Image (cartoon, grey):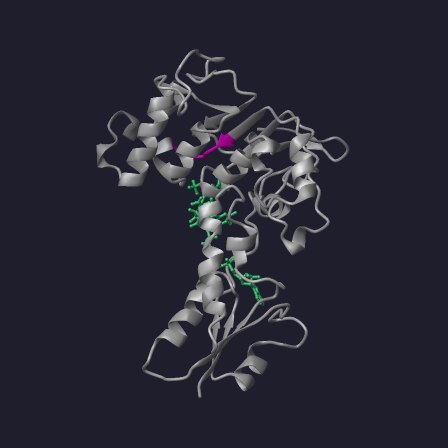
Amino acid sequence: MLRVAVIGSGPSGVYTAQALVGQDAVPDVEVYVLDRLPCPYGLVRYGVAPDHEKIKSLQHNLRTVLEHPRVHFLGNVDVGADGLGPRELRRMFHAVVYCVGAATDRHLGIPGEDLPGSHSATDFVSWYSAHPDAADGRFPLTARSAVVIGVGNVAVDVARILARGADELARTDVPQAALGALAESRVEDVWMVGRRGPSQAKFTTKELRELGALPGADVLVQPGELALDPAYGDPSGLPAVNRRNVEVLRGWAEGEGTEGKGAEGVGEGMGQGVFGGRRRVRLRFFLRPVEVVGDAESGVRGVR
Ligand SMILES: Cc1cc2nc3c(=O)[nH]c(=O)nc-3n(C[C@H](O)[C@H](O)[C@H](O)COP(=O)(O)OP(=O)(O)OC[C@H]3O[C@@H](n4cnc5c(N)ncnc54)[C@H](O)[C@@H]3O)c2cc1C
Ligand SMILES: NC(=O)c1ccc[n+]([C@@H]2O[C@H](COP(=O)([O-])OP(=O)(O)OC[C@H]3O[C@@H](n4cnc5c(N)ncnc54)[C@H](OP(=O)(O)O)[C@@H]3O)[C@@H](O)[C@H]2O)c1
């Protein structure tokens, strides 16, 4: 009998286990899925946004795999710590597959990045996802403006959670402490800042559109800034996802309004989109952060 250890119980680990017990070239493979956390499913449980219920429900499919009679889940096993390393694993198993994800942050490498009030997305997401590593974390949302650096899907998640009302999140599995802080949040403006142009943004169109559909928030773009992108005028040569992103952004810039709201006004030189929402998501492009401004005592005051 072949015994295989799979390290990590996120989707890659669980689908590896599924493939191992599903193949018939080597019969009766026994799979042990080890995770440093007590609960399985990796970022599906502790990263996918709580208001993305459909993706979160993938946990049910993953659970079916872990309930297979030849798959065993062992939580609270931190490989690399407590004397359990690759050598020990190779003594116990015929093969070891590492599916440990990418848990560490990337740093901007700019002055002020470590000031109070400047956080990695990992920390913020872990907080609203009840990740065991964030058990003591707190985010008192006392600032009026929040700046999210990056225009990928994690940035969209973070901006959306900041822009949503706590009542909209109450029916999700956001932990109570985070829900309480979100209910008292003073944040009114959420800036999403991309260092490249709209045609190079990493978010996917479905996620971008979701921002425009938030009931209590408006999305603002700067038409002049979008037009700096050579592909903005004619996006036909772009890959489909980038083309669709540009089309959504152009729709907002030209006043089609954020989804379901209709266009009614122009706000502060920011293009269309002032529809009376309590909060605003402001998308900016071609801006590279060079400094987080502030001091150790009062924390972040701005981003240059
Ligand atoms: C904030 C965020 C939101 C996302 N939302 C979506 C979404 O809505 N839709 C979508 O399609 N994708 C989404 N993604 C991407 C998706 O979550 C990842 O692509 C996917 O989870 C990667 O799977 P994985 O198994 O490689 O890693 P992970 O899901 O990170 O799983 C890795 C597992 O390995 C364990 N592990 C790590 N080190 C050790 C160790 N030393 N010993 C034992 N175990 C260990 C971890 O505890 C974890 O359980 C999101 C990503 C992020 C960061
Ligand atoms: N479907 C969903 O709802 C969902 C939700 C969350 C995550 N995900 C997936 O999870 C994966 C990870 O997402 P992600 O958003 O973390 O990564 P990502 O898609 O790579 O986006 C990272 C963003 O950060 C920017 N960035 C990186 N370093 C920077 C720097 N030094 N200065 C300024 N900007 C910087 C990038 O700009 P450049 O492009 O210029 O480098 C990019 O806009 C992706 O596959 C994503 O689709 C999916």
Residue extent of the magenta highlight: 192-197
Taking depth in this image into account, of 232 and 260 the one nearest to the observer is: 260
- Judge whether 69 appears above or below 42 on screen: below
Q: Is residue 64 left or right of residue 117?
A: left
Taking depth in this image into account, of 148 and 276 the one nearest to the observer is: 276
> Residue 286: x, y in percent?
43, 30
- Judge whether 53 appears above or below 97 on screen: above
Magenta includes 116? no
- Judge whether 73 appears above or below 246 on screen: below
User: Farthest residue toward the bottom?
Assistant: 1
| Residue plotted at (60% across, 62% down) | 39
| Residue plotted at (67% across, 28% down) | 143
> Residue 302: x, y in percent?
62, 28
| Residue plotted at (34% across, 28% down) | 248
Taking depth in this image into account, of 54 and 19 the one nearest to the observer is: 54
Majority SS type along the magenta span:
loop
> Residue 288: x, y in percent?
49, 33
Q: Is residue 252 left or right of residue 175?
A: left
| Residue plotted at (43% across, 82% down) | 29
User: Farthest residue toward the left?
Assistant: 236
> Residue 79: x, y in percent?
60, 71
User: Farthest residue toward the top?
Assistant: 265
User: Farthest residue toward the right?
Assistant: 297
Taking depth in this image into account, of 127 and 221 the one nearest to the observer is: 127
Q: Is residue 290 at all visible to an observer of this figure? A: no
How many numbered marks are there? 0
Image quarter (top left, top right, bottom left or bottom right) of the C terminus: top right
- Judge whether 18 appears above or below 165 on screen: below
Q: Is residue 133 at all visible to an observer of this figure? A: yes
Image quarter (top left, top right, bottom left or bottom right) of the N terminus: bottom left
Q: Quadrant of residue 82?
A: bottom right
